Amino acid sequence: MLAVALSFRAVVLLVFVTVAVVTSAGAYQVALVQHAMPRNKNVSKWLLQYSIDVASIVGQVGTVDMVVFPEFGLISEKAMSKCGTPSTSELGDECFTLPKINTTMCPRGNLSAAAFGSIEMLACTAAEHQTMIAANLCERDVSGTQWNTEVVFSSLGVLVAKYRKFHPYKVKCFAKPKTLDVISFEGPASTNETFGVFTCLDILYPEPSKTLYDRGIRHFVFSSEIPIVGREVKEVWSQKHPGAFLLASDSANGSTGVFYNGHFTPPWKTLKNIGEENGDVAYVHVVPL
């Protein structure tokens, strides 16, 4: 029993020493949020919860370089169950029209500058807390076509990335791009790294992650929801892409975390029930550069 206790203590000490060494050698902090898909329509409520989540994370751990939310976190199960085609309007106000990349969406730099229920709430949350935010949402373009889209906002509230999922799972809700969307963005200023983006079912196919990896990208934002893309699939992907960090946010228990060289890496800190409801959990990781 004493040996077990000493062994456990040694592991704990090793984790803290590793965090300290990595942090001093160069690293960034990412918070990966486990958040269940909403059952009923109320996108304004979930946008507000995202803002509360980020405020809670920053309040508890201080500086966070990036916060990643899972797939379908802002789209209700009820709305998606009624989809007919990717050009119908069942998703209603749960879809957003997005501006061009590099548009500043929060010029005043705080949440009070954003209209309630607007996508600017995400941009202003990023600016107010000086962190990058990656989130999955429904995008509706000017023709009325709906896309499963991952957006990334900089710590200044600028839309720096917009990726339309190449292998949509909900094909009655979201269109498949005619050409491959290979999207990357410059990460937090302290990292001097380029990050790649792909989403959920994409992980079962070579692209777009192969092209991103071949370009030398080693840090990937990944939002997912369906059980088929669980922990084991992420471990296999990271094993096939040595040296790459998969920053995975999922709605399922045990599937959210950082995956590296075929292994799930334990978080530095786990924050439970960070939102007002829905049982959101944030896993904070220190990722080496």
Image (cartoon, rainbow, N blue to C red):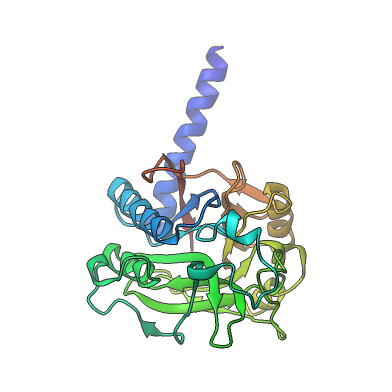
Q: Position of residue 46 (x, y in %)?
A: 43, 56
Residue closest to the far right: 205
From the viewer's side, name the closer residue of 268 and 145: 145
Lateral position of residue 127 relative to residue 153, left or right: left
Q: Position of residue 84 (x, y in %)?
A: 70, 69
From the viewer's side, name the closer residue of 228 and 90: 90
Which part of the image, by quadrant, shows the N terminus? top right
Q: Position of residue 175 (x, y in %)?
A: 68, 76
Residue 83, compared with residue 1, is above or below; it is below
Q: Position of residue 96 (x, y in %)?
A: 48, 74
Residue at x 76% of width, y 71% of height: 206
From the viewer's side, name the closer residue of 75 and 13: 75
Residue at x 35% of width, y 50% of height: 57
Residue 117, compared with residue 256, is above or below; it is below
Can the viewer see residue 246? no
Lateral position of residue 18 relative to residue 258, left or right: left
Marks counted in the figure total 0
Lateral position of residue 112 relative to residue 95, left or right: left
Residue at x 63% of width, y 62% of height: 243
Can the viewer see residue 179? yes
Which of the 4 quarters of the picture holds residue 170? bottom right
